[in-house]
Image: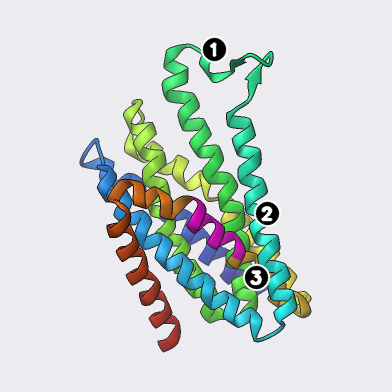
Amino acid sequence: MNAAAWTVFWYAMLTALATGLGAVPFAFIRRITPKVQGVSNAIAAGLMAGASFGLLNEAAGMNWGKMLLGFVAGILFIGFTDWVIDKIKRYKLNGDDDLIARLPNSFRNDFWKAALIILIMTAHSAAEGIGIGTSFGGSAKFGLLMTIAIAIHNIPEGLAISAVMVTKGSRWWQAALWSIFTSLPQPLLAVPAFLFVSVFKPYVPLGLGLAAGAMIWLVFSEIAPESAEQLGGERAATLITFSIVAMLAIQYFL
């Protein structure tokens, strides 16, 4: 790999390592309230939305048609991924009983719940890795902004994973390692995505649109609703709005 590709890899690796920070509070306490998770999710949602708007603006300046095509492709990609995961979660044994419901209580309440969360987070990380790589393919500025937004977003993801694993008896550092594992698709996919847009410059707006679509889908389909449930609609909306403004301000001054 060239020097630029290695730079993208290490930036993406930082976002993966940030996921492990979600486990750090469990070194001191055993339980994180939904309110704390809600605040983290709201801030992450706003920063990701703001970064996505910047990506769309950058792509539109290159080619509106390709930007829209990539945007729709990003939404369809992450939507399909979520649909597949939902099918796995709802898998029926012999078309009758839920597979997880057939398992012993200890597995049903602990291992399988953690495994499903890890699977979901890992699948979502694929889109985030593509987002980082394509962002750097557009410009270093937007690559850095996307890295910051995703790194912040990864912390509450790690918090969610760790909350399950620590509760079932794992040590906080073990939960941190599993949290980082779920984000490994980010550095692994960021480099191919970066190399793709670097070699095929005409497809840069397509890649940026795809990244923005995937991120916006995650924000409005999962992160923001979860924050609203944890904090209440008004508080979540306020934090998300201020976070969007903060990200837009960062883009403007950078």
Q: Is residue 94 visible?
A: yes
Residue at 51%, 52% (x, y): give it.
221
Q: Is residue 175 above or below residue 96?
A: below
Residue designated by label 3: 209
Amino acid marked by disc 3: Gly
Amino acid marked by disc 2: Phe
Residue designated by label 1: 102
Which of the numbered marks, if any, corresponds to residue 121?
none
Q: Is residue 165 left or right of residue 31?
A: right
Amino acid marked by disc 1: Arg
The quadrant of the rendering that contains the N terminus is bottom right
Circle 3: element type: helix
C-alpha gap between disc 2 and disc 3: 12 Å
- Residue 149: image location, x then y, percent: 45, 66
User: Which of the pair 26/78 is nearer the observer?
Assistant: 78
- Span of residues in magenta: 213-221
